[in-house]
Amino acid sequence: MLDFVLRVLLTIVLCLLSFYVGVYKAYAKIYKKSLEEYIHNHFEEEFQDDAKKNKVKDYDK
């Protein structure tokens, strides 16, 4: 009887753990995509002053 209860509790704990790991990974992917999109959209605005001061060199490849 005790063995059965331990197996059930262990199964529940493992299910909850895998659920929370999946949620964490999903939120990490969403955050990464939104950060990349923000950087892509606002890159020129953030470094416009540096480009005007010639701190950033243009490289043609």
Image (cartoon, rainbow, N blue to C red):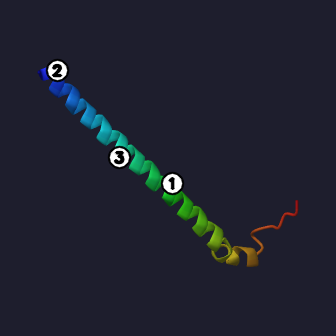
- Image quarter of residue 10: top left
Q: Three-letter amino acid code at disc 3?
A: Tyr
In this view, which residue lies farthest toward the right? Answer: 61
Q: Which mark is residue 3?
A: 2
* Place of residue 21 in the rendered image (x, y in percent of width and height, measured from the top left): 39, 44
Q: Residue at x 45, y 49 (%)?
A: 25
Of badges 2 and 3, the one in the foreground is 2
Of 60 and 38, nearer the camera is 38
- Image quarter of residue 49: bottom right
N-terminal-most mark, 2 or 1 = 2
SS state under label 3: helix
SS state under label 1: helix
Of 1 and 38, nearer the camera is 1
Q: Which mark is residue 29?
A: 1
Q: Is residue 60 positioned above or below 47 on the image?
A: above
Q: Which mark is residue 48?
A: none
Give the position of the N terminus as an image quadrant: top left
Task: Mark 2 and mark 1 in contact? Answer it, CB < 8 Å.
Answer: no
29 with respect to 49 (left or right): left
Of badges 2 and 1, the one in the foreground is 2
* Place of residue 54 in the rendered image (x, y in percent of width and height, measured from the top left): 78, 73
N-terminal-most mark, 1 or 3 = 3
- Per the image, the residue denoted by label 3 is 20
